[in-house]
Image: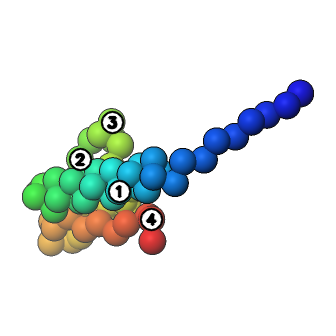
Amino acid sequence: MMVHLYYDPTKAAKGSENLQVEIQRLENELSAMDEPPDKKKHYDKYFFINCSKDGKLGLRGKIP
């Protein structure tokens, strides 16, 4: 079996940039929320989400 891999650095950079834009969009959406989102929204893929005792929504990114 032979495998051929092709790497396009331009495409990889664009994909990374698109991911960062998506994460920033999700963070902005979460910051505007008063209550924790539903699990089906999949925000927990990129963020740890919790609710403090005073009712404020807290979030921390999973990706450094």
Mark toward the start of the polypeptide (2 vs 1): 1
Give, as a three-letter code, the residue at label 3: Lys
Mark toward the start of the polypeptide (1 vs 4): 1
Q: Position of residue 22 (x, y in %)?
A: 29, 51
Q: Which label sits on residue 63?
A: 4
Q: Position of residue 25 (x, y in %)?
A: 21, 54
Report, in whole angstroms, how far the alpha carbon at label 2 lies from the one at label 1: 25 Å
Q: Which label sits on residue 37?
A: 2
Residue at 45% x, 52% y: name it: 10
Q: Residues within 10 Å of mark 3 (few under 14, many from 20)?
A: few
Q: SS of the residue at dot 1?
A: helix
Q: Residues within 10 Å of mark 2 (few under 14, many from 20)?
A: some
- Tell me if 32 is positioned left or right of 9 in this view: left
Residues 13 and 46: in front is: 13
Report, in whole angstroms, how far the alpha carbon at label 3 lies from the one at label 1: 25 Å
Q: In which quadrant will I find the C terminus? A: bottom left
Mark toward the viewer: 3 or 4 = 4
Q: Which label sits on residue 46?
A: none
Mark toward the start of the polypeptide (4 vs 2): 2
Q: Are marks 3 and 4 in contact (CB under 8 Å)?
A: no
